[in-house]
Structures are given as C-alpha cells and as structure tokens.
Image (cartoon, rainbow, N blue to C red):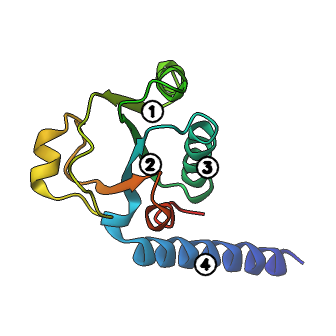
Amino acid sequence: MMVDLIWIVAAYAAAACCVRWWSARKGGAGEKESHFVLVAGNHQMQIEGYVRALRHFAWRTGREVGITIVLEPSSVDDTGKIASLLASRTDGGVGVVRGWSSSVEKGGQAGGAAMERLPLGIPPQRRLVWVNLSNEEHLRLLPR
C-alpha cells in the first residue's frame, strides 16, 4: 500500500516537471513578457474591456503583460478619464500617454524610431505590440 502511494507521488512529480519544462520551452524567454500599447481615441465603451481582457490573459497564462494606453486627441468621449482611472489603481500596471501624434502609422511590432518618440519606459526585454483599437487587423493581435 505504501509503495503504491510512493509511485503515485513520484508519477505526479514527474508529470509536473514535464509540464513545466514543456511550457518553458514552448513559451521561450521572449514570449514571457509582452507590453501592449493600445492606441485609443473614441473608445470609452471598450477600453476597460480591453484592459481587463489583457489582465485576465496575464493571470491565466502566468505571463507578465504591461499595458500603455496612448490617447489620440478626442474631445467627444471620456476615454482619457477612464484610462486615467485605470492607471491610478495600485494593482493596475497601466500607463497613459497623452498627446501622441497619430500621424505615424504603427504596425504589429514597433520600430526603433517610434519607440524613441514615445516615452513609455518599457524594459528592452519585453516584446512590444502596438494595437490601434480603430483597426480591425490590429485587434487580432490581442490575446484571447
């Protein structure tokens, strides 16, 4: 009876080690930490949902996810106020940048020139993902 219990515990420990090894190998060091830059204008109805979805993804997968909301000039909605409230929470991990010119087109991965013009303070080991919330193709970059 005791030998069976030891075999069960040993099998469980071996399985846990294999899963941990596989997930570390699959994810890779660069995939563990991502920083999402959400370019928002008139998105007062969706911005909190996007931030919550990214936080839930980070919690579910165990990955570190940074979030910066870049506010495009907009005077007809409360996206800026909502983003400021999300950033003011102590558990948030959300940054807000105002007054960014939307004349620079951003793709899925940011280039060095765009990074230099935007004061995000993102560590270099993080994978940077630009998501323009007005662009359907960019929305596909958000994790599900």
- The residue that disc 4 covers is 14
**Which of the pair 35/42 is nearer the observer?**
42
Which amino acid type is shown beneath numbered disc 1? Answer: Gly
Q: Are marks 1 and 2 in contact (CB under 8 Å)?
A: yes
As drawn, the residue found furthest toward the front would be 76
Disc 2, SS:
strand
Looking at marks 1 and 3 on the same chain, the residue that comes earlier in the sequence is marked by 3
Residue at which label 1 appears: 93
Question: For the residues marked 4 and 1, what is the alpha-carbon distance in whole angstroms?
Answer: 35 Å
What label does residue 142 carry, if any?
none
- The residue lying at 46 percent from left, 25 percent from top is 80
Do labels 4 and 1 touch, CB within 8 Å? no
Instruction: Name the secondary structure under disc 4.
Output: helix
3 or 2: mark nearer the eye: 3
Q: Residues within 10 Å of mark 3 (few under 14, many from 20)?
A: some
- Eyeballing the image, is 15 above or below 79? below
Q: Which residue is mark 3?
A: 53
Q: Residue at x 62, y 55 (%)?
A: 60
The answer to whether residue 61 is left or right of residue 127 is right
Kind of residue at disc 4: Ala
**What is the distance, in whole Å, between disc 1 and disc 3 at their CAs?**
14 Å
Q: Position of residue 10 (x, y in %)?
A: 67, 76
Closest to the camera, between mark 1 and mark 3, is: 3
> Marks 3 and 2, how far apart in space?
11 Å
State yes or no: discs 4 and 2 in contact (Cβ < 8 Å). Answer: no
Residue in the picture at 45% in, 59% down: 135
